[in-house]
Image (cartoon, rainbow, N blue to C red):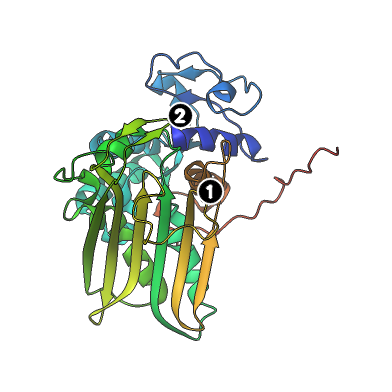
Amino acid sequence: MWGTGNVGRAAIRAVDAHPDLELTAVIVHNPDKVGRDAGDLADVGHGLGVMATDNIEKALAGAEAVVYAASGDIRPDDALADITRAIRAGATVVSPSVYALYDPTSAPAQLRDPVLAAIDDGGGSLFVSGVDPGWGNDILPILASGVASTVEQIRCQEIFDYTTYDQPDSVRYLIGMGQPMDYDPPMVAQGVPTMVWGGQIRLIARGLGVEVDEIRETLLRRPLETTIETAQMGTFARGTQGALRFEIQGLVDGEPLIVIEHITRIHPSCAPDWPMPPDGGDGSHKVIIEGRPRIEISVEATDEGGNRAAGGNATAVGRLVNSITWLRAAGPGLYDALDVPLTPALGKLKRKTPT
């Protein structure tokens, strides 16, 4: 396990629950975490007997698989170097950290070629899938399209209220919540949404057997009408950004056939006219097939005390961790979501303790 943030914690729990996987090492960069038990870092509820280390070489020695959960948002070159290092060591690597590799066929050569070279050198493999979550932006919409008679548009939505989320760097600076309205959030700078989610658009298009002519971006922002306080991230002032809505549209024959949409808030009072989670909770993921019949699938996953952002992370890493046994059997290669099947929860079922 490489990284123990919001994604890494969920991944440690997923590895611990998997009957065919054994956690052998946990790599951390924060010196305060070195020497702590992985079970403690991930809130497993018991010790795992694996102490976190910053000795990467020692941790990778003999590892058959690596879940790479360290951030690639502001350190993409370092993340790629870490991942190729693990692949050269012969490991199967699963990760959400290198967005352009959601669809390896359209990834830039400067990203894809080092991975392919590492696979040739070391015999490892790589599967990248998103944390928003990836399966909600690739295999779920493709699966849903298969029960429709006609499809006019596929829309994948992430709707989230970050009031209880503990990720100030991403929420305040990447997304721009609490920043002046003239602040330009890096996550939605022109071209960045396409860089991050364009691969998923193209992956869905491949699954549907169509070709995307163009990818278009839209953006809306709303200010907070009142100052709000959050337990995890402090104060967000009136007049600063309180809600963000953007789309990445894959155009086929001039029409937006495939759309990935994000609607995020720092408080539910901001932009109440925009779509909300169906049950009024703090988040949901949707797949909407416009066609005949019209199909709408809503997913609400909760974890870490009922937080749905944490629940979304947990389902995303569940997809990644549960793919490891298949990837090991498949052998060296660079894989995507159309290659890797969903793995049932065989052997992971748990009965509730009788009361």
Task: Give the residue type at disc 1.
Answer: Thr
**Whether residue 315 can be seen here:** yes
The residue where tag 1 is placed is: 315
Instruction: Kindly identify which numbered label has been placed on residue 153.
Output: none
Question: Which one is in front, 295 or 241?
Answer: 241
Q: Residue at x 50, y 64 (%)?
A: 140
Element carrying mark 1: helix
Q: Residue at x 39, y 39 (%)?
A: 87
Side of 162 where 237 appears, left or right: left
Element carrying mark 2: loop
Query: How many callouts does the rendering have?
Result: 2
Question: Which one is in front, 228 or 170?
Answer: 228
Side of 70 where 175 appears, left or right: left
**Whether residue 128 can be seen here:** no
Question: Which one is in front, 209 or 180?
Answer: 180
Place of residue 4 in the rendered image (x, y in percent of width and height, measured from the top left): 45, 29
User: For residue 75, what is the image quadrant?
Assistant: top left
Instruction: Kindly identify which numbered label has been placed on residue 4.
Output: 2
Q: Determine the CA span between mark 2 and mark 1.
A: 16 Å
